[in-house]
Image (cartoon, rainbow, N blue to C red):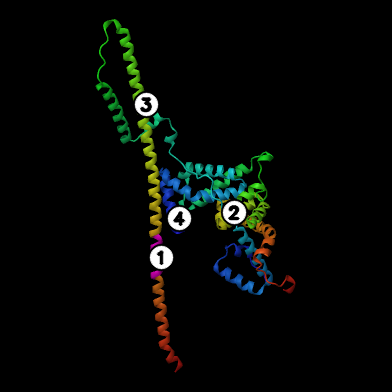
Amino acid sequence: MNCPDLKAYVLGETDRTEREEIRSHLAVCDACRLEAERLRVTTTALRMLPDEEIPVHVRFVSDKVFEPWWRRWRLMPSGAFAAALLAVLLIVEASRLLPQRPQPPASSQAVATLTSAEIQTRINQAVDARVKSEVSLVAAQMERRNDEHTLAMLADFRQKSQTDRQRLIQAVETEYQSVDQKVNQAVFAANEKLPVLNQ
Amino acid sequence: MIFREVEDRDLISRARKGSLDAYNVLVSRWEKRVFNYLLKLVGNREDALDLTQDVFLKAHQAIRKLEDDAKFSSWIFRIAHNEAFSLLRKPRRESEMVTDFAGGDLSGRLYPSETALAVASALNRLSSEQREVVTLKIYEGFKFEEIADVLETPVSTIKSRLYSALDVLKTALAPIGARQYTPYPEKTMGDV
């Protein structure tokens, strides 16, 4: 008698016919039965090696995050750009509406010119700082929105999966009831015929 | 599992269109499997983690080239295989080599139980190629044809590697079987 491919059998690589043949063989061949048991113990032991959790999750973020802020500014969505632009305009307008300093006397014209330039520099710095702050804020909001979007997507997938599972369970139940009904009918029909057969 | 596949296809399709969110969800589903496959192959957690990141980065760059979404698992493990073997092929300093993950502190941290240690030790007796097919078959549940697809190797070679590996493992793990399972009949071969 040729002994079958027990490794394929234990590894689940045989079809139904092959499995039935092998089981029949194992019923009469002690050596193969012992070998199959050893292989099964080996694969069971191997599966006892637990999977490790990954120490750090792999995540990808938009390249924009790694770009300098002025490029992010350029790539910003139009809404965010408009908000930042509005902030800049408000700052400029506020600085224009501030009470004007009294004009210095004519003798101090050079000092007055210097002061004006200094003011301009300070305004520029303030505007720059405000723009940076606004851009950072908008970038943070975008990232938060991305996170929320990812979470919503995950929830959506879970929901979809749950619905699909429920649908499957329902289909199986319906099928089961149908089969059960048919079996009952068959049993009933068989019972009805029994007296005839007995006679 | 069927629904999971459908959803993976959906994610792949979205990722291909540039959705980073979809790709991140896909990564979250596969990273543990890929990491554990690489860990068993290279035997070092840090290397496995680095490689896992490389695998998903390369996959992201190449996802538009994936022809059949249904073959994503084979495809991602193929990338992981290439990454792992390009690392394994590199000559490494002796101090960097962690070939025996069944002994020393590393394995103690990786697989604490006695049986798990014995299994890790047994796996370490295998060649990289044998360990890889065992990992893909036993731990990842691939069919012979799928393993052949991942490794781009004939099925006959896969079977040969796997069968010889099983013989080694069977001998190495026999004491565990005798101690823990003792399912063997009382009779010996002499009684047959």
Which segment is the magenta one?
A164-174
Q: CA distance from mark 4 to mark 2?
A: 21 Å
Q: Please report, as a chain letter, where disc 4 is located.
A: B
Q: Where A8 falls versus B11 (above or below)?
A: below
Q: Residues within 10 Å of mark 1 (few under 14, many from 20)?
A: few
Per the rendering, the mark at residue B135 is: 2
Name the front one of labels 1 and 2.
1
Picture coordinates of residue B29, whole percent (x, y): 48, 51
Element type at marker 4? helix
CA distance for labels 1 and 4: 18 Å
- A190 vs A81: above or below: below
| Real-space CA distance between mark 1 and mark 2, rounded to the nearest whole angstrom | 33 Å
Mark 4 surroundings within 10 Å by alpha-carbon count, few (fewer than 14), some (14 through 19), many (20 or more): some
Helix, strand or loop at label 3? It is helix
CA–CA distance between discs 2 and 3? 56 Å
Tell me if residue B53 is in the magenta stretch.
Answer: no
Taking A99 as reference, is A13 left or right? Answer: right
Q: Would residue A165 be counted in the magenta stretch? A: yes
The residue that appears at 30% across and 11% down in the rendered structure is: A112
Q: Is residue B35 in view from this perspective?
A: yes
| Residue in view at x 58 percent, y 69 percent | A19
